[in-house]
């Protein structure tokens, strides 16, 4: 191992902080030297990352690939399903827009006071709207 090199900070840093920093550096270097003498091996993380590929790049099964393709197609049809919801169930469309698609975070109590309904009624209408959207998308898949 090489010699320890004292690190100078300059006049901006107090002398006691510089001494303490260098003391800790020297202790760390000493511990690394002892570990090397005793056969302790520290992994080089670049080598570890190179030997373990990114999970996103791993091949997926055919079933997972079909599921991902189905999910992408459903997302593509979502805007059309929302327009169908707007014509068939405008109250639910307004709730979906306010609760899920607005830029601001909205709570159910806020929606209840905005629409003059109870929390249970708001939850029920959102559940119905989500169910209708799901039906529209599945209906489109089966065409």
Image (tube, rainbow, N blue to C red):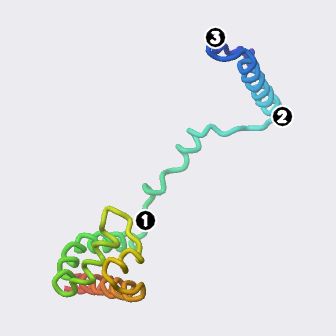
Binning the other alpha carbons within 10 Å of mark 1 as few (below 14), some (14 to 19) or many (20 upward) gives few
According to the picture, the residue beneath numbered tag 2 turns out to be: 38
* Residue 47 screen position, x and y as percent: 57, 40
- Alpha carbon distance from label 3 to label 2: 40 Å
State which quadrant residue 48 falls in. Answer: top right
Q: Nearer the viewer, residue 36 or 81?
A: 81
The earlier-in-sequence mark between 2 and 1 is 2
Cα distance in 3D space between marks 2 and 1: 43 Å
Give percent across and percent down for residue 14: 69, 16
The residue wearing badge 3 is 11
At 78% across and 22% down in the image, what residue appears? 23
Q: Tell me the residue that label 1 is attached to.
A: 60
Q: Residue at x 35, y 69 (%)?
A: 68
Residue at position x 65%, y 17% in the image: 13
Q: Up-down: is 102 above or below 130?
A: above
Q: CA distance from mark 3 to mark 1?
A: 58 Å
Residue count near mark 3 (Cα–Cα under 10 Å), binned few <14, some 14–19, many ≥20: few
């Amino acid at each position: 191992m090489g010699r320890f090199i004292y690190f100078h900070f300059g006049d901006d840093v107090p002398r006691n902080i510089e001494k303490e920093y260098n003391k800790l550096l020297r202790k760390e270097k000493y511990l690394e030297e002892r570990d090397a003498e005793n056969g302790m091996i520290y992994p080089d993380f670049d080598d570890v990352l190179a030997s373990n590929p990114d999970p996103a790049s791993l091949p997926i099964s055919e079933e997972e690939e079909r599921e991902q393709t189905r999910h992408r197609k459903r997302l593509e049809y979502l805007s059309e399903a929302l327009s169908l919801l707007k014509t068939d169930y405008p109250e639910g469309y307004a709730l979906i827009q306010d609760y899920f698609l607005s830029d601001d975070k909205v709570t159910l109590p806020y929606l209840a006071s905005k629409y003059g309904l109870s929390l249970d009624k708001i939850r029920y209408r959102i559940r119905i709207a989500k169910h209708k959207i799901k039906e529209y998308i599945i209906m489109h898949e089966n065409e």
